[in-house]
Image (cartoon, grey):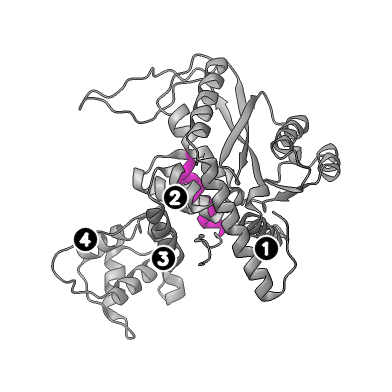
């Protein structure tokens, strides 16, 4: 049997960009759904669970994952085109984009950035690969490949010395021990104010929300728990992030697997998740805490589950207080979990994964791990 389809490991920049797209939901629906698919797959979520998450066919999910593994984030924008054959080859276009995104100083040009005129002149005069192109067509090509004139920005890169080891451990437990894997994270801050979103409405008569952003109710945080094995999401709203709240969430996760078998909880590096009390309780109760690297929250499978919460509970809403918001959020979670995959299907999938693991271990002589 073929190996399950899974997105390759994300880079820091890819993970941060996908997280922005999924959390904000300000891009087109196709980009948001594809970003959700890629981020969920890279963090270990199985294809059937992703298909249910984005309401798509499993083959569509696999196609998006394969496209990402081949082309990277360009897979967020499928290219459907026609018309006459292009006069510039794909290699020429790749050279144009690479040149436009390279600082002129590296190409022995005495300026810090290109103008369209300067770039077109450089391409036409390049001795190794001359490309003659008009300025308007050059603008169009750059726009098609999402290269625009922007102000410089700062960026973050994970400097965690154990980054690779942590990502390797997360990949191992989500691939081999998915039915023992859980994820935990905080979602917020949640404030009481009108939230923009999208709704169906008559043309030229969009749904209206008050234009007041006065915040008098304070903020809350949703402490969410996600089970990769049976695709269940639950949690509770708290006033703050604290070690005692993290411990309560971990106890609810432990209760979801009461057989005493070891479980693995994927979470981030928040100090509240690493208090002495949390670590001591985890050691006593056979709970391994798998921390994501610094600035790599995209490696946590629950991050992809927070996108629909923001879209269908927070988007286009005007909740009067936190009590109503909590009620609506838990109502959505009950609906979501009730529409999860059928338990018989999950059991059959677990048996099939166990059979494949057994055959692989017998073939390669590796020690077996009970499911």
> 182 or 164: which is nearer to us?
182
- Can you identify the residue that label 3 sits on? 71
Q: Left or right of 5: which side holds 235?
A: right
User: In the picture shown, does residue 247 fall above or below 19?
Assistant: above
- Can you identify the residue that label 1 sits on? 164
Q: Secondary structure at mark 1?
A: helix
How far apart are the two marked residues, 2 and 1, measured between alpha carbons?
23 Å
> 97 or 49: which is nearer to us?
49
Q: Is residue 146 magenta?
A: no
How far apart are the two marked residues, 3 and 1, measured between alpha carbons?
23 Å
Looking at marks 2 and 3 on the same chain, the residue that comes earlier in the sequence is marked by 2
> 67 or 151: which is nearer to us?
67
- Can you identify the residue that label 2 sits on? 35
Looking at marks 2 and 1 on the same chain, the residue that comes earlier in the sequence is marked by 2
Q: Secondary structure at mark 4?
A: loop
Categorize mark 4 by other alpha carbons within 10 Å: few (<14), some (14-19), many (20+). few
x%, y% of residue 102? Answer: 43, 69
Which residue sits at x=49%, y=14%? 320
- Can you identify the residue that label 4 sits on? 81
Residue interval drawn in magenta: 11-23
User: In the picture shown, does residue 148 fall above or below 358?
Assistant: above
Looking at marks 2 and 4 on the same chain, the residue that comes earlier in the sequence is marked by 2
Q: Are marks 2 and 3 in contact (CB under 8 Å)?
A: no
How far apart are the two marked residues, 4 and 1, measured between alpha carbons?
39 Å
Which residue sits at x=58%, y=36%? 233
Q: Are marks 2 and 1 in contact (CB under 8 Å)?
A: no
């Amino acid at each position: 049997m073929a190996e399950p389809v899974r997105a390759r490991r994300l880079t820091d920049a890819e993970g941060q960009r996908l997280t922005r797209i999924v959390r904000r939901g300000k891009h087109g629906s196709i980009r948001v759904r594809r970003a959700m698919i890629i981020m969920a797959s890279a963090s270990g979520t199985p294809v059937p669970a992703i298909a249910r998450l984005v309401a798509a066919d499993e083959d569509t999910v696999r196609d998006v994952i394969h496209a990402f593994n081949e082309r990277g984030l360009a897979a967020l924008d499928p290219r459907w085109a026609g018309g006459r054959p292009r006069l510039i080859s794909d290699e020429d276009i790749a050279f144009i984009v690479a040149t436009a995104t390279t600082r002129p100083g590296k190409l022995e040009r005495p300026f810090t950035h290109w103008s369209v005129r300067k770039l077109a002149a450089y391409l036409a005069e390049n001795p190794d690969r001359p490309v003659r192109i008009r300025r308007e067509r050059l603008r169009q090509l750059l726009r098609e490949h999402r290269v625009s004139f922007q102000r410089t920005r700062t960026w973050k890169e994970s400097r965690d010395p154990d980054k690779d080891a942590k990502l390797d451990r997360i990949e191992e437990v989500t691939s081999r021990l998915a039915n023992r894997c859980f994820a935990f994270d905080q979602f917020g801050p949640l404030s009481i104010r009108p939230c923009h979103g999208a709704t169906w409405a008559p043309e030229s008569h969009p749904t209206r929300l008050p234009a007041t952003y006065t915040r008098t109710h304070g903020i809350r945080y949703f402490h969410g728990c996600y089970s990769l094995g049976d695709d269940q999401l639950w949690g509770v709203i708290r006033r703050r992030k604290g070690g005692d709240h993290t411990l309560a969430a971990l106890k609810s996760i432990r209760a979801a697997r009461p057989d005493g078998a070891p479980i693995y909880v994927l979470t981030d590096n928040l100090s509240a998740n690493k208090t002495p009390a949390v670590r001591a309780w985890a050691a006593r109760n056979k709970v391994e805490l798998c921390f994501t690297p610094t600035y790599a929250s995209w490696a946590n499978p629950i991050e992809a589950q927070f996108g629909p919460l923001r879209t269908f509970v927070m988007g286009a809403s005007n909740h009067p207080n936190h009590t109503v918001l909590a009620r609506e959020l838990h109502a959505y979670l009950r609906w979501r979990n009730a529409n999860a995959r059928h338990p018989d299907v999950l059991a059959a999938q677990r048996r099939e994964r166990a059979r494949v693991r057994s055959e692989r271990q017998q073939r390669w002589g590796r020690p077996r791990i009970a499911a």
